Image (cartoon, rainbow, N blue to C red):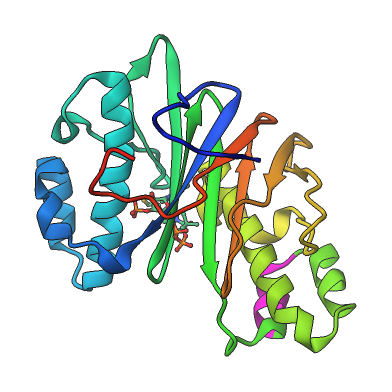
Amino acid sequence: MENLDYNKVNLSTENVHVLLINFSTFDFQNYMNYLTSNEIKRLGNINNINNRNQFVASRVVIKKILSKYLKKIPNKIEFSFNKHGKPFIRDKYHNHRFEFNISHSDIYGLIAITLDNKIGVDIQKINHDIDVDSLSSRFFSENEKTQLMNLDKSKKIDAFHLGWARKESFIKAIGEGVAYGLDNFTVSLEKNDTKSILDIKNKKWHCYNIIDFENYKTALTTEIKSKIITSSNEVNISTNF
Ligand SMILES: CC(C)(COP(=O)(O)OP(=O)(O)OC[C@H]1O[C@@H](n2cnc3c(N)ncnc32)[C@H](O)[C@@H]1OP(=O)(O)O)[C@@H](O)C(=O)NCCC(=O)NCCS
Protein backbone atom coordinates (compact mmCIF):
# COMPACT_ATOMS: atom_id res chain seq x y z
CA MET A 1 0.00 0.00 0.00
CA GLU A 2 1.29 3.45 -0.90
CA ASN A 3 0.44 6.85 0.52
CA LEU A 4 -1.72 9.06 -1.68
CA ASP A 5 -0.41 12.52 -2.57
CA TYR A 6 -3.01 13.91 -4.90
CA ASN A 7 -0.70 16.43 -6.51
CA LYS A 8 1.63 13.68 -7.65
CA VAL A 9 -0.45 10.61 -8.40
CA ASN A 10 -2.85 10.27 -11.30
CA LEU A 11 -5.61 7.74 -11.70
CA SER A 12 -4.57 4.71 -13.71
CA THR A 13 -5.89 1.25 -14.48
CA GLU A 14 -3.22 -0.27 -12.20
CA ASN A 15 -4.03 1.55 -9.00
CA VAL A 16 -7.02 2.27 -6.80
CA HIS A 17 -7.08 5.50 -4.80
CA VAL A 18 -8.78 5.42 -1.42
CA LEU A 19 -9.71 8.61 0.44
CA LEU A 20 -10.93 8.98 4.00
CA ILE A 21 -13.41 11.76 4.77
CA ASN A 22 -14.48 13.13 8.13
CA PHE A 23 -17.96 14.66 7.92
CA SER A 24 -17.92 16.20 11.38
CA THR A 25 -16.30 19.44 10.22
CA PHE A 26 -18.15 19.60 6.90
CA ASP A 27 -21.09 21.93 6.21
CA PHE A 28 -22.98 20.83 3.11
CA GLN A 29 -24.49 24.30 2.66
CA ASN A 30 -21.13 25.67 1.54
CA TYR A 31 -20.97 23.22 -1.36
CA MET A 32 -24.38 23.44 -3.02
CA ASN A 33 -22.72 24.70 -6.21
CA TYR A 34 -21.23 21.22 -6.75
CA LEU A 35 -24.64 19.62 -7.15
CA THR A 36 -26.80 19.03 -10.19
CA SER A 37 -30.53 19.78 -9.99
CA ASN A 38 -31.23 16.04 -9.52
CA GLU A 39 -28.82 15.94 -6.59
CA ILE A 40 -30.40 19.02 -5.02
CA LYS A 41 -33.78 17.27 -5.30
CA ARG A 42 -32.40 14.12 -3.66
CA LEU A 43 -30.79 16.17 -0.90
CA GLY A 44 -34.24 17.63 -0.18
CA ASN A 45 -35.46 14.15 0.74
CA ILE A 46 -32.69 13.58 3.29
CA ASN A 47 -33.71 14.87 6.71
CA ASN A 48 -30.82 13.98 8.95
CA ILE A 49 -28.02 16.57 8.92
CA ASN A 50 -25.24 13.98 9.13
CA ASN A 51 -26.74 12.10 6.17
CA ARG A 52 -26.92 15.34 4.21
CA ASN A 53 -23.26 16.02 4.93
CA GLN A 54 -22.40 12.42 3.92
CA PHE A 55 -24.28 12.76 0.66
CA VAL A 56 -22.81 16.11 -0.34
CA ALA A 57 -19.24 15.56 0.90
CA SER A 58 -18.82 12.33 -1.04
CA ARG A 59 -20.08 14.01 -4.21
CA VAL A 60 -17.76 17.00 -3.70
CA VAL A 61 -14.72 14.75 -3.31
CA ILE A 62 -15.54 12.61 -6.35
CA LYS A 63 -16.42 15.60 -8.50
CA LYS A 64 -13.23 17.45 -7.52
CA ILE A 65 -11.26 14.44 -8.70
CA LEU A 66 -13.29 13.85 -11.86
CA SER A 67 -13.36 17.49 -12.91
CA LYS A 68 -9.57 17.43 -13.13
CA TYR A 69 -9.73 14.65 -15.74
CA LEU A 70 -12.92 15.68 -17.52
CA LYS A 71 -12.24 19.43 -17.53
CA LYS A 72 -15.87 19.93 -16.54
CA ILE A 73 -17.20 22.06 -13.72
CA PRO A 74 -18.51 19.91 -10.83
CA ASN A 75 -22.21 20.72 -11.23
CA LYS A 76 -22.05 19.49 -14.83
CA ILE A 77 -20.89 16.04 -13.71
CA GLU A 78 -23.99 13.86 -13.51
CA PHE A 79 -24.10 10.46 -11.81
CA SER A 80 -26.13 7.64 -13.39
CA PHE A 81 -27.25 4.56 -11.46
CA ASN A 82 -27.44 0.87 -12.30
CA LYS A 83 -30.68 -0.94 -11.51
CA HIS A 84 -29.45 -1.72 -7.99
CA GLY A 85 -28.57 1.90 -7.26
CA LYS A 86 -24.79 1.83 -7.83
CA PRO A 87 -23.72 5.26 -9.06
CA PHE A 88 -21.43 5.60 -12.07
CA ILE A 89 -20.66 8.24 -14.66
CA ARG A 90 -20.97 7.86 -18.41
CA ASP A 91 -18.10 10.24 -19.26
CA LYS A 92 -14.91 8.47 -20.36
CA TYR A 93 -11.30 9.48 -19.93
CA HIS A 94 -9.27 8.60 -23.07
CA ASN A 95 -11.59 5.63 -23.58
CA HIS A 96 -11.22 4.51 -19.97
CA ARG A 97 -14.21 4.03 -17.70
CA PHE A 98 -14.13 5.73 -14.31
CA GLU A 99 -15.03 3.36 -11.51
CA PHE A 100 -15.73 4.60 -8.01
CA ASN A 101 -17.58 3.63 -4.89
CA ILE A 102 -18.69 5.36 -1.71
CA SER A 103 -19.34 4.20 1.84
CA HIS A 104 -20.23 6.07 5.00
CA SER A 105 -20.64 5.17 8.64
CA ASP A 106 -21.34 7.83 11.25
CA ILE A 107 -18.82 10.66 10.83
CA TYR A 108 -16.48 8.82 8.45
CA GLY A 109 -16.69 8.05 4.78
CA LEU A 110 -14.50 6.27 2.27
CA ILE A 111 -14.22 6.87 -1.43
CA ALA A 112 -12.39 4.53 -3.78
CA ILE A 113 -11.73 5.50 -7.37
CA THR A 114 -9.93 3.97 -10.34
CA LEU A 115 -10.21 3.25 -14.09
CA ASP A 116 -11.63 0.14 -15.82
CA ASN A 117 -11.73 -1.97 -12.65
CA LYS A 118 -14.96 -2.69 -10.79
CA ILE A 119 -14.55 -1.80 -7.12
CA GLY A 120 -16.54 -1.73 -3.92
CA VAL A 121 -15.61 -0.12 -0.64
CA ASP A 122 -17.11 -0.34 2.82
CA ILE A 123 -16.67 1.23 6.24
CA GLN A 124 -18.45 -0.03 9.35
CA LYS A 125 -18.48 1.59 12.76
CA ILE A 126 -18.24 -1.19 15.32
CA ASN A 127 -21.49 -1.62 17.21
CA HIS A 128 -20.92 -3.51 20.46
CA ASP A 129 -24.63 -3.93 21.10
CA ILE A 130 -25.49 -6.11 18.12
CA ASP A 131 -26.46 -9.75 18.42
CA VAL A 132 -23.65 -11.33 16.37
CA ASP A 133 -25.07 -14.87 16.52
CA SER A 134 -28.47 -13.84 15.28
CA LEU A 135 -27.13 -11.61 12.46
CA SER A 136 -24.53 -14.12 11.30
CA SER A 137 -27.10 -16.92 11.29
CA ARG A 138 -29.22 -14.83 8.90
CA PHE A 139 -26.57 -13.33 6.63
CA PHE A 140 -23.31 -15.31 6.81
CA SER A 141 -22.33 -18.38 4.76
CA GLU A 142 -21.84 -21.75 6.53
CA ASN A 143 -18.07 -21.32 6.28
CA GLU A 144 -18.24 -17.84 7.88
CA LYS A 145 -20.49 -19.13 10.68
CA THR A 146 -17.90 -21.81 11.41
CA GLN A 147 -15.10 -19.21 11.45
CA LEU A 148 -17.08 -17.17 13.99
CA MET A 149 -17.97 -20.16 16.14
CA ASN A 150 -14.27 -20.89 16.68
CA LEU A 151 -13.54 -17.45 18.11
CA ASP A 152 -13.51 -16.18 21.70
CA LYS A 153 -16.38 -13.89 22.59
CA SER A 154 -13.96 -10.92 22.76
CA LYS A 155 -12.83 -11.42 19.15
CA LYS A 156 -16.25 -12.15 17.71
CA ILE A 157 -17.47 -8.56 17.45
CA ASP A 158 -14.34 -7.46 15.58
CA ALA A 159 -14.40 -10.47 13.26
CA PHE A 160 -18.08 -10.00 12.53
CA HIS A 161 -17.64 -6.33 11.55
CA LEU A 162 -14.57 -7.08 9.43
CA GLY A 163 -16.51 -9.84 7.68
CA TRP A 164 -19.49 -7.56 7.21
CA ALA A 165 -17.30 -4.79 5.69
CA ARG A 166 -15.68 -7.31 3.34
CA LYS A 167 -19.02 -8.77 2.32
CA GLU A 168 -20.53 -5.35 1.63
CA SER A 169 -17.46 -4.24 -0.35
CA PHE A 170 -17.86 -7.35 -2.52
CA ILE A 171 -21.58 -6.93 -3.27
CA LYS A 172 -20.89 -3.26 -3.97
CA ALA A 173 -18.02 -4.11 -6.37
CA ILE A 174 -20.34 -6.43 -8.25
CA GLY A 175 -22.93 -3.63 -8.14
CA GLU A 176 -25.89 -5.73 -7.05
CA GLY A 177 -25.91 -4.82 -3.38
CA VAL A 178 -27.78 -7.10 -1.00
CA ALA A 179 -29.85 -8.51 -3.89
CA TYR A 180 -26.80 -10.69 -4.67
CA GLY A 181 -27.42 -12.74 -1.53
CA LEU A 182 -25.00 -12.29 1.35
CA ASP A 183 -24.70 -16.02 2.02
CA ASN A 184 -23.80 -16.83 -1.62
CA PHE A 185 -20.07 -16.28 -1.06
CA THR A 186 -17.47 -16.44 1.70
CA VAL A 187 -14.90 -14.00 3.05
CA SER A 188 -12.21 -14.58 5.63
CA LEU A 189 -12.94 -13.09 9.05
CA GLU A 190 -9.23 -12.96 9.81
CA LYS A 191 -7.57 -9.55 9.29
CA ASN A 192 -4.36 -10.84 7.73
CA ASP A 193 -6.10 -13.33 5.49
CA THR A 194 -7.07 -11.35 2.39
CA LYS A 195 -7.67 -14.34 0.18
CA SER A 196 -9.74 -13.81 -2.94
CA ILE A 197 -13.51 -13.96 -2.87
CA LEU A 198 -15.21 -16.28 -5.37
CA ASP A 199 -18.45 -15.16 -6.95
CA ILE A 200 -21.20 -17.58 -7.96
CA LYS A 201 -19.51 -18.11 -11.34
CA ASN A 202 -16.24 -18.97 -9.59
CA LYS A 203 -14.61 -15.73 -10.71
CA LYS A 204 -11.97 -14.38 -8.29
CA TRP A 205 -12.36 -10.92 -6.75
CA HIS A 206 -9.53 -9.34 -4.78
CA CYS A 207 -9.93 -8.36 -1.15
CA TYR A 208 -7.81 -5.66 0.52
CA ASN A 209 -7.33 -4.21 3.98
CA ILE A 210 -7.32 -0.46 3.65
CA ILE A 211 -7.45 2.15 6.41
CA ASP A 212 -7.89 0.64 9.86
CA PHE A 213 -8.56 2.71 12.91
CA GLU A 214 -10.22 2.46 16.28
CA ASN A 215 -13.90 1.53 16.31
CA TYR A 216 -14.15 1.09 12.53
CA LYS A 217 -13.58 -1.76 10.06
CA THR A 218 -12.96 -1.11 6.39
CA ALA A 219 -12.60 -3.19 3.23
CA LEU A 220 -12.06 -2.88 -0.49
CA THR A 221 -12.87 -5.43 -3.20
CA THR A 222 -11.59 -5.10 -6.76
CA GLU A 223 -12.17 -7.01 -9.97
CA ILE A 224 -8.53 -6.74 -11.06
CA LYS A 225 -5.52 -7.13 -8.77
CA SER A 226 -4.38 -3.58 -8.02
CA LYS A 227 -1.96 -1.34 -6.19
CA ILE A 228 -3.89 0.42 -3.42
CA ILE A 229 -2.94 4.03 -2.71
CA THR A 230 -4.51 5.40 0.44
CA SER A 231 -4.64 8.93 1.86
CA SER A 232 -2.80 8.70 5.19
CA ASN A 233 -4.80 11.63 6.57
CA GLU A 234 -8.41 12.63 6.24
CA VAL A 235 -9.01 14.53 3.03
CA ASN A 236 -9.29 18.29 3.51
CA ILE A 237 -12.34 18.92 1.36
CA SER A 238 -11.87 22.67 1.20
CA THR A 239 -8.53 22.31 -0.65
CA ASN A 240 -7.73 20.54 -3.87
CA PHE A 241 -6.18 17.76 -1.85
C1 LIG B 1 -25.37 -0.81 -1.55
C2 LIG B 1 -25.70 -1.24 -0.15
C3 LIG B 1 -25.02 -2.56 0.11
C4 LIG B 1 -25.17 -0.09 0.73
O1 LIG B 1 -25.14 -0.41 2.05
P1 LIG B 1 -24.82 0.51 3.31
O2 LIG B 1 -23.81 -0.20 4.14
O3 LIG B 1 -26.10 0.86 3.93
O4 LIG B 1 -24.24 1.88 2.82
P2 LIG B 1 -22.79 2.41 2.48
O5 LIG B 1 -22.64 3.69 3.19
O6 LIG B 1 -21.70 1.43 2.63
O7 LIG B 1 -22.92 2.70 0.92
C5 LIG B 1 -23.79 3.65 0.44
C6 LIG B 1 -23.30 4.05 -0.94
O8 LIG B 1 -23.22 2.90 -1.77
C7 LIG B 1 -23.46 3.29 -3.10
N1 LIG B 1 -24.40 2.30 -3.64
C8 LIG B 1 -25.75 2.30 -3.62
N2 LIG B 1 -26.21 1.18 -4.22
C9 LIG B 1 -25.13 0.47 -4.60
C10 LIG B 1 -24.97 -0.79 -5.26
N3 LIG B 1 -25.99 -1.52 -5.67
N4 LIG B 1 -23.70 -1.23 -5.48
C11 LIG B 1 -22.65 -0.49 -5.10
N5 LIG B 1 -22.74 0.71 -4.47
C12 LIG B 1 -23.96 1.17 -4.23
C13 LIG B 1 -24.00 4.71 -3.08
O9 LIG B 1 -23.00 5.56 -3.57
C14 LIG B 1 -24.27 4.99 -1.62
O10 LIG B 1 -23.93 6.28 -1.19
P3 LIG B 1 -24.77 7.58 -1.62
O11 LIG B 1 -26.18 7.26 -1.27
O12 LIG B 1 -24.18 8.70 -0.85
O13 LIG B 1 -24.54 7.72 -3.08
C15 LIG B 1 -27.23 -1.42 0.08
O14 LIG B 1 -27.82 -0.16 0.21
C16 LIG B 1 -27.90 -2.14 -1.09
O15 LIG B 1 -27.83 -3.33 -1.22
N6 LIG B 1 -28.55 -1.40 -1.95
C17 LIG B 1 -29.19 -1.95 -3.15
C18 LIG B 1 -30.68 -1.80 -3.01
C19 LIG B 1 -31.34 -2.05 -4.33
O16 LIG B 1 -31.15 -3.08 -4.98
N7 LIG B 1 -32.12 -1.06 -4.77
C20 LIG B 1 -32.79 -1.16 -6.03
C21 LIG B 1 -33.52 0.10 -6.35
S1 LIG B 1 -32.38 1.46 -6.57
Observer-nearest residue: 103 or 168?
Answer: 103
Q: Main secondary structure of the magenta part?
A: helix
Q: Quadrant of ligand 1?
A: bottom left
Above or below residue 230? Residue 191 is below
In this view, the residue in front, 21 or 175, is 21
Which residue occupies the extreme right position in the image? 150
Q: Could you tell me residue 50's position as x and y percent?
A: 27, 70
**Quadrant of the image containing the N terminus:** top right
Q: Is residue 95 above or below residue 32?
A: above
> In the rendered image of this protein, does residue 241 appear above or below residue 51?
above
Image position of 181 (left or right of 200): left
Q: Residue 160 at x, y = what percent?
A: 69, 73
Task: Look at the image and say whether residue 138 sits in the magenta stretch.
Answer: yes
Say left or right for 192 vs 209.
right
Tell me the residue at 59%/59% (across/down): 218
Residue 168: image location, x then y, percent: 58, 56
Q: What segment is highlighted magenta in the picture?
A: 134-140
Q: At 90% from the left edge and 77% from the top edge, which residue is drawn?
A: 150
* Horizontal side, residue 151 vs residue 75: left or right: right
Look at the image and say whether residue 156 sits in the magenta stretch.
no
**In the image, what residue occupies the spot 16% across and 28% down?**
73
Asked whether 13 or 131 is in front, the reply is 13
**Residue 181 found in image quarter:** bottom right
Q: Which quarter of the rendered picture does the C terminus lie within?
A: top left
Q: Residue visible at 79% across and 37% down?
A: 202
58 relative position to 214: left or right: left
Toward the top, the furthest residue is: 94
